[in-house]
Image (spheres, rainbow, N blue to C red):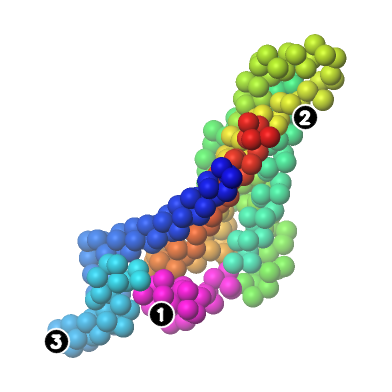
């Protein structure tokens, strides 16, 4: 019953988080220190100031920029709920269509990274915790420190500079980017495994010092049984929370790498929209990132409640 109440309250919290995030997105859009429509029309505006002003006002009305902040949010939400539309590009075309064209690349990279670095982090964390301060533990820490300490974009630039790898492909053909697409995937896996395994290791080291772990050893349980039946179970809550919250960071990392390596994806789409001041696309993608981050945070909180040992 207590968990049911927590779940209901957390759902309400999720809805408030989504609404508040949308308000913040539109608020930031409205306080930028220039008129986005005026800048958008810089190269296309008529020679007459009167005609230019008339066109600016017409476009502001067409894009709903003449409405108050909450009215803009309300219009966006209404269209999203009724039609599932994330808006229109200022250069023509639906944001949904643009996302469909680029989402497959970003989604594939995210799935590959997630299914690789999570088990790798757990395996490395468990194995080094069991061999604390031994040569294996020292070796893993030294190697992972390289990828943990050097920013991922520096690693990407070094690969592009000295790797002599040609990146080319047809955006309409997903498989034309194979096998080069696995280079940014590999960089991301190395970086996040190097970070997350340290959390697993430190949590397990703390748990292994507890009295009930010593009691389990005293009862004659094997090292494997103590680790997997008792230690990992009690270390799960912070580990699950960290893995879940790290996924939005992984998305942003992949977005940057997509741009650096020239692969299609949400990252390149967002950069192109920023270059062209296409605020319709920027707001739509920001709303997608907000939804992903909010839902993953919600899932993390619920899962942590379920795996907390005190509940069982």
Q: Which residue is mark 2?
A: 228
From the image, give the main secondary structure of the stretch colored magenta: helix
Identify the residue at horizontal 27%, vertical 67% (top origin).
Answer: 69
**How far, Cα to Cα, is label 3 from label 2?**
74 Å
Q: Secondary structure at mark 3?
A: helix
Q: Position of residue 113 (x, y in %)?
A: 66, 50
Q: Work out whether mark 1 precedes mark 3 in sequence or the reverse, and give the earlier one.
A: 3
Q: Which mark lies nearer to you, 2 or 1?
A: 2
Residue 165 on the magenta span: no
Q: Secondary structure at mark 2?
A: helix
**How far, Cα to Cα, is label 1 from label 3?**
23 Å
- Residue span colored magenta: 75-102
- Whether 200 is drawn above or below 92: the answer is above
Mark 1 crowd level (few <14, some 14–19, many ≥20, 10 Å Cα): some
Q: Are marks 1 and 3 in contact (CB under 8 Å)?
A: no
Q: Which mark lies nearer to you, 3 or 2?
A: 2
Q: Nearer the viewer, residue 311 or 51?
A: 311
Question: Can you say which quadrant of the picture contains the C terminus?
Answer: top right
Residue 50 badge: 3
Q: Which residue is mark 1?
A: 91
């Amino acid at each position: 019953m207590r968990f049911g109440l927590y779940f209901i309250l957390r759902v309400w919290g999720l809805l408030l988080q989504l609404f508040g995030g949308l308000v913040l997105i539109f608020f930031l859009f409205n306080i930028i220190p220039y008129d986005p429509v005026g800048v958008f029309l810089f190269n296309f505006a008529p020679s007459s100031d009167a005609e230019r002003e008339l066109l600016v006002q017409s476009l502001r009305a067409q894009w709903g920029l003449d409405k108050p902040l909450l009215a803009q949010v309300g219009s966006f939400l209404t269209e999203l709920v009724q039609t599932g539309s994330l808006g229109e590009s200022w250069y023509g075309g639906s944001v949904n269509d643009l996302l469909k064209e680029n989402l497959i690349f970003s989604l594939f990279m995210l799935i590959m990274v997630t299914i690789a670095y999570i088990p790798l982090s757990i395996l490395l964390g468990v194995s080094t915790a069991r061999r604390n301060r031994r040569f294996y533990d020292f070796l893993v820490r030294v190697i992972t420190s390289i990828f943990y300490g050097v920013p991922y974009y520096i690693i990407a630039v070094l690969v592009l500079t000295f790797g002599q790898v040609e990146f080319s492909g047809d955006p309409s053909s997903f498989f034309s980017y194979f096998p080069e697409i696995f280079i940014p995937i590999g960089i991301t896996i190395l970086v996040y495994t190097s970070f997350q395994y340290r959390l697993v290791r430190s949590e397990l080291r703390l748990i292994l010092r507890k009295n009930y772990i010593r009691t389990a050893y005293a009862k004659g349980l094997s090292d494997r049984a103590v680790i997997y039946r008792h230690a990992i179970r009690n270390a799960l809550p912070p580990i699950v929370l960290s893995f879940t919250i790290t996924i939005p960071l992984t998305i942003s990392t992949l977005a940057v790498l997509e741009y650096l390596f020239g692969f299609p994806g949400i990252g390149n789409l967002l950069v192109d929209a920023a270059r062209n001041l296409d605020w319709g696309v920027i707001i739509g993608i920001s709303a997608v990132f907000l939804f992903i981050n909010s839902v993953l945070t919600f899932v993390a909180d619920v899962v942590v409640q379920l795996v907390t040992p005190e509940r069982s």
